[in-house]
Amino acid sequence: MAILIFFILHWYTSLFFQSIFHHRYAAHGIFTMSKFMEKLFYIGCFITQGSSYISAYSYGMMHRLHHAHTDTKKDPHSPDNTANVFTMMWLTRNNYFDIYKGKTAVEEKYKKDLPEWRAFDKIAHNWITRLLWLAAYIAFYVHFATEWWMFLFLPITALMGSFQGAAVNWWAHRFGYVNFKMKNTSKNILPVDIIFWGEAFHNNHHYHPSKADNASRWFEVDSGYIAMRIMDKMKLIRLKAK
Ligand SMILES: [Zn+2]
Ligand SMILES: [Zn+2]
């Protein structure tokens, strides 16, 4: 039971930081916040993403490239460029590390206003830290697992961020429904999104990348947007458009 509760909590908290901080704040600048709050978000990403922590700066660039070059050879994670979801995950990883290490030349326009905290990334974004997280996850599973099959969740726990990224980016350019006809393959993957913090409305998002609310039809509810509205009311962040 402890494993399942942990897994569910880990899923939602990790994706919360990925969606709100990496995607909506870093890549799209949906809201602004103080440097202090930005640092709290960095720390939140580290705690919740653990072994799969990624840099908001590099992710922001990679994601902007995805919007600029959707479905083409220059798209850093188009399902069309690989054979299956696992090879796409691997290609995304390689493209991400090339951007992180500066091996890929990225135009200045894709770097504008990205959050950056190099000193923190030095600690959070290295193999020793990742291995320590992995050791902590294994210890937790060994201590709390009551059935053998619970260990099947361990690889997903270790690769949580990459797994969630691949789930959305592969699925949302393969299967789902379309509200807005565009020249790209983006789809809304679930009409009622209770597992992806509103990231399931990927077709809506491609149509309005700078809109805070990813929902567009009456039955669509973007829980990430609701969370941002609450944080805006609490004056933790400032939504640019309400
Ligand atoms: Zn997309
Ligand atoms: Zn986006």
Image: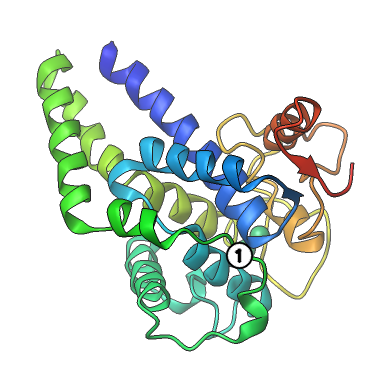
Residue 232: name its quadrant.
top right
Residue at x-position 75% and y-position 48%: 31
Rendered position, 195 above or below 24: above
Image position, residue 159 (x, y; %) = 30, 47
* Residue on which disc 1 sits: 114
Q: Find ligand 2 in the image and state its quadrant.
A: bottom right
Horizontal side, residue 87 vs residue 65: left or right: left
Horizontal side, residue 130 vs residue 74: left or right: left
Along the line of sight, the residue nearer the viewer: 222 or 114: 114
Tell me the SS state at disc 1. Answer: loop
Pointer 1: residues within 10 angstroms few (<14), some, or many (20+)? some
Residue at x-position 35% and y-position 26%: 7
Along the line of sight, the residue nearer the viewer: 20 or 115: 115
Along the line of sight, the residue nearer the viewer: 79 or 74: 74
Along the line of sight, the residue nearer the viewer: 6 or 149: 6
**Pointer 1 residue Cβ closer than 8 Å to ligand 2:** no
Image position, residue 116 (x, y; %) = 51, 61
Residue at x-position 10% and y-position 23%: 142
